[in-house]
């Protein structure tokens, strides 16, 4: 029994850091632009247009009112860079988030974007130094409430706001090379 308990603990610790959706998450996050853990198209990066990826979110629980999105670029010695934050996207059993969201507070449909890179709202693509590959992580949270966050909210304020309201979550990882 002791070995089984240790294996369970190690699995529970590894799930939040895996490239896919954790077993407890319940959400499946996918994009027709790239598969989980694979190379992202050039159009999604800072050097080719900063076009946000199309996302499909499924498995949203019945009690969810909204979705929130957080995208970070991993691997920088200074810590993860926040590339995209969006909140108050209406929840449904399956949600489609359109590609190429505007670089503005208002999304193409319902939902609002917060300021990320350079203090401007909207998606900003990964932007590693020439020749470097960076890992990106898109996290989607199904929430039991809408969030009242100012446009210039920080990632920490975003995370504090979603805390206690998360019904389910899912992830999509990608790699970007300039």
Image (cartoon, helix red, strand yellow):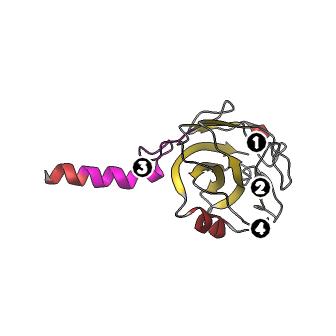
Q: CA distance from mark 3 to mark 4?
A: 31 Å
24 in the magenta segment? yes
Query: Number of labelled discs?
Result: 4
**Where, by quadrant of the figure, is residue 178 drawn?**
top right
Q: Mark 3 against mark 4, which lies toward the viewer?
A: 4
Q: CA distance from mark 2 to mark 1?
A: 17 Å
Q: Earlier in the sequence, mark 1 or mark 4?
A: 1
Residue extent of the magenta highlight: 7-28
Q: Is residue 31 left or right of residue 23?
A: right
Check residue 44 in the rendering and tell me which mark sits there, or answer none.
Answer: 1
Residue lying at 62% horizontally and 61% vertically, measured from the top left: 80
Which residue carries the number 4 mark? 150
Q: CA distance from mark 3 to mark 1?
A: 26 Å
Which residue carries the number 2 mark? 113
Q: Position of residue 65 (x, y in %)?
A: 62, 49
Q: Mark 2 against mark 1, which lies toward the viewer?
A: 2
Q: Secondary structure at mark 3?
A: helix
Which residue carries the number 3 mark? 15
Q: Position of residue 88 (x, y in %)?
A: 70, 53
Q: Earlier in the sequence, mark 2 or mark 3?
A: 3
Q: Earlier in the sequence, mark 3 or mark 1?
A: 3
Q: Secondary structure at mark 4?
A: loop
Q: Mark 2 against mark 3, which lies toward the viewer?
A: 2
Q: Earlier in the sequence, mark 3 or mark 4?
A: 3
Q: Residues within 10 Å of mark 1 (few under 14, many from 20)?
A: many
Residue lying furthest top in this view? 32
Q: Mark 3 against mark 1, which lies toward the viewer?
A: 3
Q: Position of residue 36 (x, y in %)?
A: 56, 37
84 in the magenta segment? no
Q: Secondary structure at mark 1?
A: helix
Residue lying at 78% horizontally and 68% vertically, measured from the top left: 152
Q: Earlier in the sequence, mark 4 or mark 2?
A: 2
């Amino acid at each position: 029994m002791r070995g089984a308990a240790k294996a369970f603990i190690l699995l529970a610790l590894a799930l939040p850091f895996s490239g896919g959706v954790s077993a407890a998450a319940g959400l499946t996050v996918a994009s027709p632009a790239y598969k989980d853990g694979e190379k992202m198209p050039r159009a999604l990066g800072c050097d080719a247009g900063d076009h946000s990826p199309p996302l499909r979110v499924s498995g949203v629980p019945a009690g969810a009112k909204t979705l929130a999105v957080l995208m970070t670029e991993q691997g920088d010695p200074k810590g993860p860079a926040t590339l995209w934050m969006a909140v108050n996207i209406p929840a449904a059993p399956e949600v489609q988030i359109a590609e190429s969201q505007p670089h503005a507070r208002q999304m193409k449909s319902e939902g609002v974007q917060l300021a990320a890179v350079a203090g401007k709202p909207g998606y900003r693509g990964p932007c590693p130094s020439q020749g470097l590959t960076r890992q990106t992580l898109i996290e989607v949270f199904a929430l039991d409430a809408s969030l009242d966050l100012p446009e210039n909210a920080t990632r920490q304020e975003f995370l504090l706001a979603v805390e206690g309201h998360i019904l389910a979550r899912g992830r999509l990882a990608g790699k970007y090379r300039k």
